[in-house]
Image (tube, helix red, strand yellow):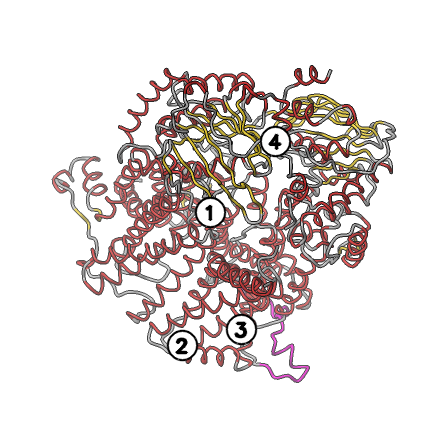
Amino acid sequence: MQDRNGPESATRPGDSPAPAVQPPKAAERGMSSAQPAIELKGISKAFGPVQANKDISISVAPGTIHGIIGENGAGKSTLMSILYGFYRADRGEIFINGQKADITDSQAAIAAGIGMVFQHFKLVENFTVLENVILGAEDGRLLRPSLAKARRELKALASEYGLDVDPDAVIHDIGVGFQQRVEILKALYRQADILILDEPTGVLTPAEADQLFRILHRLKDEGKTIILITHKLREIMEATDTVSVMRRGEMVATRKTSDTGPEELAELMVGRKVLLRVDKTPAKPGADVLQIEDLKVTDESGVLRLKGIDLTLKAGEILGLAGVAGNGQSELLEVLGGMLPAVGTVTGRVRMKGEVLPLSGAAGDGKARRAAHIGHVPEDRQRAGLVMDFFAWENIAFGYHADAGYQRSGLFMDNQGLRREAADKMDRYDVRPPDPWLKAKSFSGGNQQKIVLAREIERKPSLLLVGQPTRGVDIGAIEFIHREIVALRDAGAAILLVSVELDEILSLSDRIAVMFDGKIMGERLPGETDEKELGLLMAGMNNAASGEAA
Amino acid sequence: MEKMPAWADVVLIPLISLILAAAISALVILFIGESPAEALNLMVTGALGSTYGWGYTLYYATNFIFTGLAVTVAFHARLFNIGGEGQAMIGGLGVAVACLYVPWPHWSLALVAACISGAVFGAAWAAIPAWLQAKRGSHIVITTIMFNFIAAAVLNYLLVNVMRPTGSMDPATERFAETIHLPTLHELLAPFSIAFSKAPPANVSFLVAILACVAVWALIWRTRLGYEIRAFGHTETGAVYAGISPVKIIVVTMLISGGLAGLMGINNVMGEAERLVLNATEGAGFIGIAVALMGRGHPAGVFLSAILFGFLYQGGAELALWTSIPRELIVVIQALVILFTGALDNMVRMPLQQVFAALRRKEST
Amino acid sequence: MDLASILQILESTIRLSTPLLLACLAGLFSERAGIFDIGLEGKMLAAAFFSAAVASMTGSVWLGLLAGIAASLVLSGLHGLASITFRGDQLISGVAINFLAAGMTVLIAQDWFRQGGRTPSLPSDARFNPITLPFADRVADVPVLGPVYSDLMSGNSILVYVAFLAVPATWWVLYRTRFGLRLRAVGENPAAVDTAGVSVVALRYAAVGICGVLCGIAGAYLATSLQAGFVKDMTAGRGYIALAALIFAKWRPWYALWSCLLFGVLQAVALRYQNIDLGSLVIPVQFMDALPYILTVVILAGFVGKAIPPRAGGQPYVKER
């Protein structure tokens, strides 16, 4: 494995303006005497070589809403899963109401009064609300008394907190907003005093989200302690009393929400990273290559993932798509690259050099897109871009394997030619080790990515789709990859770059569009914007951002 | 990173599984009051000690090569074709049809026609489960099991009501013409003055089976279709990325798989019985599962494990003849092989991975 | 057809449905917990042999029943080990178990009894004999209802009543108890059970265990009640028909009863009449034999009321990161 945190560790010194441990503010609403509801001390957790949580300490006062904010992969969910006993920390201690708690599993967490609403709900789809609520918290061996009791309590909880749900409705018949209420009810039914919500608004409409926050405030008023994990700044500002910022597995700051603002939080979240220098001349944009009009994508569960995208991309320019993961960038890349949803619908109009690209059927598949001179470096290189169990030389043709040049006498593939080509490309793209007989899974992330790039760039596509080009890639390779992308631009290709790394977007793009919630929030030029403004746009704060920028 | 070297996966794991299966079988033999060493000795001399024994071993192996290849090809697309038995049955029907209703002047022409007909019938029998899996998401394991039973009923009906010669009480077709008798190994080797026993049914189909091994190897590792099958088997997302249609791969792979199982008919129907009888497959379709699991996805492995199972079958028959150990011992061994190489793979694999990890740590320090 | 022959067919339907029903409910417990089980056949076969063998040796059919259940439970444990503990392929494990039972039963039978892989015929006192329900003799002469009570409902072995009572019992356990709620949940979404603080592994082993017990009774019924002793491969595909019935029943207990009765009728008719002559059309007996499988494929294809298996079925549970 490569050191994923290479660029970050170089920037660490002098970077964190606040100490990692922040004792609760004494003056807070007369709660100075109370023990913190939750206190984590020095929590660390590694998954294999990846350090998901590094020496994290945090303290939350009872009866408050505490936000934890950070980019994707910052380690928020891992931390909370440890608190809920889903994972065990490698090191560190947990205190609940001042008592040291040994949370070995979810049962122990529930007994300690902790409830959790996961990002992906843990509900049994074909059960009723009532059945889901009592599951694991039944009284006695028979269901009838448990159900009757739960029905009474649900009624009480509903009126107390405004959590109305039909107890006899089946989960797959009710909307996600109601499903989330069921998750909250599950926790309350187990007498949770501490409620953790992981990205709770990810699946909600704005109206549903507003309703959720009203409920959370009622819960707080009743003395519950709430931890809200999110990447959306607006939610932090609106709903929380205190906020902690996580970055790359570390807790970088804790603030009282009233003492800070979205600008500072955005900066803390993203970090002031050393801008990777990319040598590039100003773009000389040519004719329109790609025109997207009103592109909408509905996924298999009927959720609208792209809500009408309009974009134009010119030859010889790099358009960077910034945004927090899960806001529609993946769907956009997939539709353009021919990975159409098997179930679900795609509507709108996409034209490539004036030709309409089909959005369904075999005419819109990956092969057809490649024939239209669209190259695709997919976001998920391990599942899509490469076959990990294939040799490097087999992967060098992946997606182009039906090309006439790779066939010998119709029936057989020209494997020798492939191996020669692979050796040649691996040499030129500095893949290490340059051995075509190694399986893709034996290479480091950076070298895997070089194999994908060699395959896609060497075909001189008119349009290159690039997703997360440097995710899990070492610094040396990052520079190389960026150089190759710029070189392709200079050769006249249009490039659509999707990355959750803001510095990558800023240093590589000629134009930046920000996506949020399936829509383009706005376009900016890299010279005329900064991470703070982009961070606000990424968090869905359009008006505030333009106001600030002016 | 690879958790252990490739050779360990290909050689060591099946070997350990085999040793475990053999050890338990030895215990079973002990339990029924016989000597495992003596049993092994008897099996080796009975199955490999004479050209007579080899003739039967290779005859059985031929069946298992076809069904083992059938399961293997499907495994490459991550499909579990448990319907080899039914496909082989219907394939046998195809072979019988080709042999019965055309007056072939020479066995070689008849063999070609029987191969095509058997493969087409077998493929057709796999087509419906394949299509249902690809288009309707119906679990192919369940549908192919059901199709095994349906095949048995179809065959039963045809043999009893349609293909049985008038006046015969036996639910079987009439004997194929003498002109299309397939040369046995005895006849094939005679021109080279190699003495081979006359009795056993091993015949020219064994050579066809070897050809099928080569063809499957070429298909999987040399053709574009094989490339697409393997890519789909490893990652469906990747296949979609590369513009490979999952529907097409599922259907085509199952047609090939069913075709291979159907080819078995040239050995047991045309080569041995020379007529179609009830239950001609004798479970060879299921042994294909064990053979494929042992063979580790490679036709060479399938070939070797088919020979091994051929040896077990012939050796087991010898055991039943000379000792109190019934033939069913091989069914137990087959079950243990499937258990250890398939279902309990992790039980064998995890300790082995730890051993290799420890070795690597030692090396690096 | 007269009343007598209808009654005869129905009688034989009840006898033939019984092993299907027990095995089907066994599969229901396992699959509702998310463990696919194509090893019903093997477990029944092992139970059939051991129940007949022990009944023959001890003369006690009840000890035979216990032995059958124990044998079936051993195979269930093996299936659990492979598919729950070692997260192996549940289907491959089931296939292995079927072969293991097919081979071992004959092997041991031959060693113990030396009768070519069968047990000696069980004398009547080492079998489950028909039980006559109260008043059966007295009402026998009442038209229609009399024979229905005295021939159909009365005069079956105790295991038949066990099987038919197992249907409401299964329904009750599944839908009226805490265990049933958790069992159904673990087959749909094990993560929901896990986060609720309940052990997924323990639940699944319990389900596989119940499956073993029911398969054990089914096997014992075959060898000590339906027939008098064990013969090689005596299950004759009943495990697979039970599996088909389970799919046909969409994994629900009452539907399981109806589908097993349906498949039982098919078997009874096929047993009694070779070919059914409908005047212009003759339905061959083989078609009747194949009908359960054909119906199952049609159901699986989703053209007639799609059968949706438990969502988490077939997949080992691994905590996601």
What's the CA distance linking mark 3 and mark 2? 20 Å
Segment colored magenta: B173-196
Q: Nearer the viewer, residue A285 or C157?
A: A285
Task: Mark 4: give few (<14), some (14-19) or many (20+) Cα within 10 Å.
Answer: few
The numbered dot on residue C316 is 1
Residue at mark 1 shares a chain with residue at mark 4: no
Foreground: disc 4 or disc 2: 4
Mark number, residue B57? 3
**Which of the two marks, 3 or 2, is nearer to us in this view?**
2
For image coordinates 24% across by 62% down, the residue present is C54
Question: Quick check: do tags 3 and 2 share a chain?
Answer: yes
- Mark 1 vs mark 3: in front: 1
Q: Is residue B177 magenta?
A: yes
Q: What's the CA distance linking mark 3 and mark 4?
A: 78 Å
Q: Which residue is mark 4?
A: A17
> Percent from the top left, x then y, of residue C16?
32, 48
